[in-house]
Amino acid sequence: IYGAFGTLNMADIAFKSRTASVFPFSGVIVGNIHLASAIALALSMWAFTFKAAVVPNHFWLPDAHPAAPTPISAALSGLVVKVGVYAIIRFLYTIYGLDTLQPISNVVSIMMKVLIILGMASALIASALMIVQTDIKRLIAYSTIMHVGFIVAGLSLGTRLGLEASLYHTINHAVGKALLFLAAGVLINVARSRNIDEISGVGRYLRLTTLTLILAILSLEGLPPLAGFFSKLLLYEAFISSGLAVLAAVLIISSAFALLAYVKLLYGVYFKLPTREFGKIKEEWIYLAPLLILAALLVVLGITAPLFVSEVLSPISEELTNPIKYILAAEKVIKVLGG
């Protein structure tokens, strides 16, 4: 990128990829920006799919979750993998975009199509693998891969609705998955095992914790009026409006596979008779407090969905799809710092 554009400033690259003109703060283009952009996009997207755990670069996440402490797993799933998603958005909408010069815009269009395919592959493969997992954390890890697949496919549609849906699902998944991991962590801590068969019935001793676990699952599965329902509905509408009904079908099928895995988890945790005595267990508020806060947040995000989308997500998606404002803002900052 630097060899062609003469800069690594995102606003500078965004300006030059759309006008091929001289940016007032970094001078002229010094190389073949078309070839450089194609190579940079391909390599960058490949790297970002590692960070976001998108198939086929998802393999590290199912091993990382079981090895990490539960709070780290919650942060890893809810926040860290989303950094890769953020980077993809910045490259596809801010630095480059469908409004860039030819043939850069063609490369962006091809890259979006590839990411849609990878996103849907992530959703289908991960949801199917969820069913056969016996380790709770590995099951949840594959759930993360599935949902990131939805998000990446949505933002790769190249539409404002797709971007809004992906942003909303990113937030809802972060909250829901953090709640799911923390609730599962309490159960694992009491049972001293991550194996679903070995912790059978432990949920009967931790009813509030199990209730928050169920709430997280219902939101991730898209049950109204929880937050996950509205973001999945937006994704569904985005796929349909883009003429890609097959993606909406994949979303439904993947969610159905995931439901089978969650039913298996809930049956083992709560409905299956305990195979050993867990002793006297008291649910401590130091563990319950964050669970209840996240559970309440899921409900609030669901109830306020129309307002949240129109007042928060819509302006954000407008800013992301209009790089001119970003370029002008960066220009002002450069002037201030330079003066």
Image: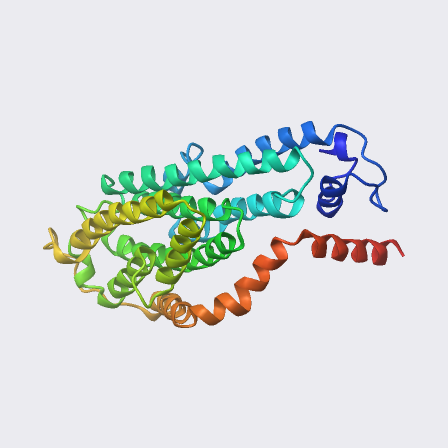
Q: Position of residue 173 (x, y in %)?
A: 41, 55
Q: Is residue 89 above or below residue 45?
A: below
Instruction: Please tell me which residue is depicted at 80% across the width and 54% down the height of the picture.
Output: 331
Residue 178 in view: no
Relative depth, front residue between 223 and 289: 223
Residue 66: quadrant of the picture = top left
- Labels in figure, total: 0
12 to the left or right of 209: right
Residue 117: quadrant of the picture = top left
Q: Where is residue 1 in the image (x, y as percent from the top left)?
A: 71, 33
Q: Where is residue 156 in the image (x, y as percent from the top left)?
A: 50, 44
Relative depth, front residue between 177 and 193: 177
Q: Is residue 62 above or below residue 182?
A: above
Residue 303: quadrant of the picture = bottom left
Relative depth, front residue between 292 and 145: 145
Instruction: Please tell me which residue is depicted at 56% across the width and 43% down the height of the picture.
Output: 88
Q: Position of residue 63 (x, y in %)?
A: 37, 37
Which residue, as the protein is rendered here, is positioned at the far right?
A: 339
